[in-house]
Image (cartoon, rainbow, N blue to C red):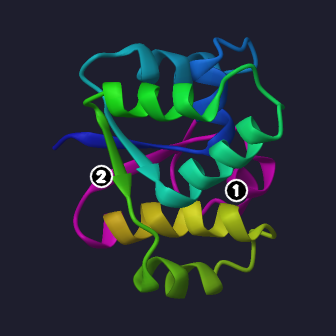
Amino acid sequence: MVTKNTLDTHTLLWFLADDPRLGPNAGAVLEDPESELVLPAIVLAEACWIVQRGRIALSVLDLLAAIDADPRIQVVALDRTIIERSVGLTAIGEMHDRQIVATVLVLQDKGETVRLLTADRDITASGVIPIIW
């Protein structure tokens, strides 16, 4: 079974900006042309917000073009099922992070093997999903 790799916001942005803060294991997954990548819609929205605020040297158009150009990336919509699942993730304090984790859990519920590429301490400490960094 193929493992899908879900990106969090910093993972996506650090990869696109070739930022050294990207974890080596996450970087190896992102460099692998065979990797299947999941991009929660909330991550895309948050990344656009960060780019728009000038916190990274990309434009929103560059960000969107990079995502569109990578056939490995599947954008997963934020829907009611994900929102419902996120409400119960009280070990994770931030709403966006809960929605990212809930996306992984919903995909797992559908029989997918999914892990998250993240350095987020709250998500990692929660132990709710497999993490690669």
Q: Position of residue 54 (x, y in %)?
A: 83, 31
The amino acid marked with disc number 1 is Ile
The amino acid marked with disc number 2 is Thr
Residues under labels 1 and 2: Cα distance?
A: 18 Å
Lower sequence index among marks 1 and 2? 2
- On screen, residue 127 versus residue 90, left or right, reads left
Q: Is residue 36 above or below residue 6?
A: above
Nearer to me, 43 or 1: 43
Q: Which residue is found at the position 43% from the left and 23% from the top?
A: 29
| Figure quadrant of the C terminus | top right
Q: How many marks?
A: 2
Q: Which residue is found at the position 22% from the left and 65% from the top?
A: 111
- On screen, residue 56 versus residue 82, left or right, reads right
Nearer to me, 90 or 62: 62
Q: Position of residue 125 (x, y in %)?
A: 75, 55
Question: Circle 1 sits on which residue?
Answer: 123
| Magenta stretch contains residue 2 | no
Q: Is residue 50 above or below residue 86?
A: above
For disc 2, the neighbor class at 10 Å (few under 14, some 14 to 19, many from 20) is some
| Figure quadrant of the N terminus | top left
Q: Is residue 88 visible?
A: no
Question: Circle 2 sits on which residue?
Answer: 113
Q: Position of residue 72 (x, y in %)?
A: 28, 32
Q: Which residue is found at the position 41% from the left and 83% from the top?
A: 81
For disc 1, the neighbor class at 10 Å (few under 14, some 14 to 19, many from 20) is many
Query: In the rendered image, which quarter is residue 71 located in?
Result: top left
Nearer to me, 92 or 94: 94
